[in-house]
Image: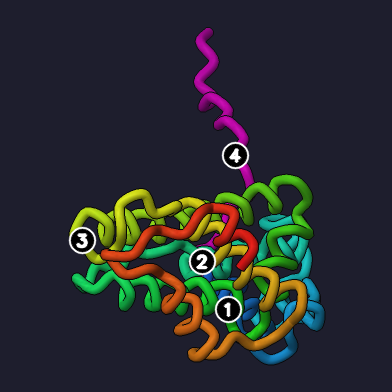
């Protein structure tokens, strides 16, 4: 006689209830804003979200993974600024990079959440900075093509120096970068009739 029992369904990974999933991410964002990255725990996230602690652990291995996902959409760079004024574009890009690295008012949110995930997190941080840098390189090359900046401008070196400055000040020194600081960086860009700075001069500056 044929076996009429239904075939066993294949096992699937932990099912994430969409409402509970979003509640956990929202709780993580709120707690980071209130307590800073170091003050957030998995227990606090679960309590704020109104879910069981084990539910959170079933979906994420640690708080770094939760927070990384919670802020992921705020980390990705948008399109390269294109106002037609390369210096205004550069200023907009710099503001956005500072805003990204000081997300929710605390630079440890980005660096802590990504680097505490080990090599995968550090790779994500490198990819994040690279993605932002690509936008800056594009806007500077547009400036050269339109005649607002001189031919031969060491674009990659300038972008690296800007990125390094922002990361060093915000992440390693914990200092606030002011609008005047950003304007100072932009004013270092040469005018179209000037000779472009040598790469060594940019690095030294």
Q: Is the magenta stretch mostly helix, strand or loop?
A: loop
- Element under label 2? helix
Residue at 29% from the left image edge and 69% from the top image edge: 86
Q: Mark 3 points at which residue?
A: 147
Task: Please name which of the two marks, 2 or 3, marks the residue nearer to the observer.
Answer: 3
Residue at 67% from the left image edge and 56% from the top image edge: 59
Q: Mark 1 points at which residue?
A: 103
Asked if labels 2 and 4 touch by Cβ distance under 8 angstroms, the answer is: no
- Element under label 3? loop
Q: What is the number of the mark on residue 203?
A: none
Residue at 41% from the left image edge and 69% from the top image edge: 189
Residue span colored magenta: 1-19
Rate crowding at label 1 as few (under 14), some (14 to 19) or many (20 or more) other CA atoms within 10 Å.
some
Asked if labels 3 and 2 touch by Cβ distance under 8 angstroms, the answer is: no
Q: Which colour scheme is used?
A: rainbow
Q: Quick check: is 16 in the magenta stretch?
A: yes
Q: Alpha-carbon distance for marks 2 and 3?
A: 32 Å
Q: Name the residue under label 4.
A: 12
Q: Mark 2 points at which residue?
A: 75
Q: Quick check: is 116 in the magenta stretch?
A: no
Q: Which of marks 2 and 3 is nearer the N terminus?
A: 2
């Amino acid at each position: 006689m044929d076996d009429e029992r239904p075939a066993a369904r294949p096992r699937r990974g932990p099912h994430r209830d969409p409402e509970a999933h979003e509640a956990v991410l929202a709780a993580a964002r709120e707690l980071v804003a209130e307590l800073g990255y170091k003050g957030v725990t998995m227990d606090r996230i679960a309590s704020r979200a109104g879910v069981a602690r084990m539910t959170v652990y079933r979906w994420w291995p640690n708080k770094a993974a939760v927070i990384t996902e919670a802020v992921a959409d705020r980390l990705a760079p948008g399109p390269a600024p294109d106002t037609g004024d390369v210096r205004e574009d550069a200023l907009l890009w710099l503001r956005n990079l500072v805003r990204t690295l000081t997300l929710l008012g605390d630079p440890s949110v980005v660096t802590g959440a990504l680097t505490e995930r080990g090599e995968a997190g550090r790779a994500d941080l490198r990819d994040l900075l690279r993605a932002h840098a690509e936008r800056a390189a594009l806007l500077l090359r547009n400036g050269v093509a339109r005649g607002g900046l001189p031919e031969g401008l060491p674009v990659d070196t300038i972008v690296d120096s800007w990125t390094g400055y922002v990361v060093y000040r915000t992440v390693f020194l914990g200092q606030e970068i002011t609008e005047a600081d950003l304007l100072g960086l932009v004013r270092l860009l040469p005018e179209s009739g000037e000779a472009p700075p040598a790469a060594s001069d940019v690095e030294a500056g």
